Each structure stands twice: as structure tokens, then as C-alpha cells.
Amino acid sequence: MFLRISCGAARAMLPVLLAALLLSACAAKDDADGAQDGMTISVSLRDVHRCSRISPEIQLSGIPAGTTYFDVRLVEYGDQENFFGGGSWPNDGTSTIPEGGLTRHYRGPCPPAGQSRNYAFVVSAMGGRDIQPLAVRLYRFTQE
């Protein structure tokens, strides 16, 4: 028995299916080698980062062995997800992505006046040429 799905319905379901596959793949890898057990992130958000091209400082700890760089993205989530850019930063041993370090079309959180929005910095620890992250962490916050 086959299930028929319209092209529009398939397109609408694609992001959800891809996210589920990616998260399950990350979880399987993390369970296998314990790479994600201790990675944590903290973000130093200040007023200067609101509606700005200046990214905040991001502190990392418990970085998995073999991490060569970090891929960082800022997303607004809720009824509709919006991508606010990000960038990559080499793992230089400092455990810090400095303020202003994200340059790939980055724009800080900027909700409409009088409204609040939910955001998340998604930080992926990447190793060499691997396309699968060694660890992924989210820093969720609400901006008013």
C-alpha cells in the first residue's frame, strides 16, 4: 500500500523530516562516542547586539576532542522560523567566539516594538571535513 502526498504537503513536511533525521543522527553519534556529554555554551547578550550586525561573545566549555571549528547560527523560532545568519569560528583553544566574530550575513535579534520573540543560537562543534557535528548545543532566549 502506498501513501499519496501532494507536492505542497511534501514540501511543508520536508523541514520537519530533515530535522528529525539530523537530530536522530546526532543523537546516535553522541551516544556512540560520548562527544556531546559535556559541551555547554553561554552567550553575553547586551543592548548593542539588538538589531545589530555585531554578534555577542559566546563562551564554550566541554568542547569535544577533534573539534576544529564551530558553526554558529541565530534562528527565530515559533510559528515561523527565520534565519538571522551566523558564521564559523576556528577552535583556537580559547573556548571563546569573540564579540563581532560572526560575519556570515549575521543580524542580531530584532523583534517589532512592543513584541517579544523566541530565538536560539545553535552552536555546532565540527571536526575536520566531517559534515556531521561532534556536538550541537542551543542557547534559547526571548528578546523584547
Image (cartoon, helix red, strand yellow):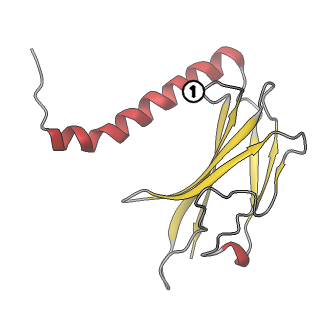
Location of residue 97 in the rendering, given as x and y in whole percent from the top left corner: 79, 52
User: Which quarter of the picture shows residue 94?
Assistant: top right
Residue sitting at x 75%, y 48%: 41
37 vs 3, nearest the viewer: 3
> What type is the residue that disc 1 sits on?
Cys
User: Which quarter of the picture shows residue 51?
Assistant: bottom right
Reply above or below: 108 against 39.
below
Residue farthest right in this picture: 94
Is residue 7 found left or right of 14 in the rendered image? left
Quadrant of the rendering where the C terminus is positioned: bottom right
Residue farthest bottom in this picture: 113
Is residue 6 found left or right of 137 in the rendered image? left
User: Which quarter of the picture shows residue 90?
Assistant: top right
Location of residue 33 in the rendering, given as x and y in whole percent from the top left corner: 70, 16
Quadrant of the rendering where the N terminus is positioned: top left
Residue sitting at x 50%, y 69%: 117
Location of residue 110 in the rendering, given as x and y in whole percent from the top left corner: 55, 74
4 vs 31, nearest the viewer: 4
91 vs 15, nearest the viewer: 91
Residue sitting at x 52%, y 63%: 118
Q: Looking at the image, how many numbered discs can be counted on the residues?
A: 1
Question: Pointer 1: what residue?
Answer: 26
Task: Decide: few, some or many residues near mark 1? Use Cα within 10 Å; few <14, some 14-19, many ≥20.
Answer: some
34 vs 127, nearest the viewer: 127
* Local secondary structure at mark 1: helix
Reply above or below: 79 against 39.
below
Location of residue 75 in the rendering, given as x and y in whole percent from the top left corner: 53, 56
Reply above or below: 5 against 102.
above
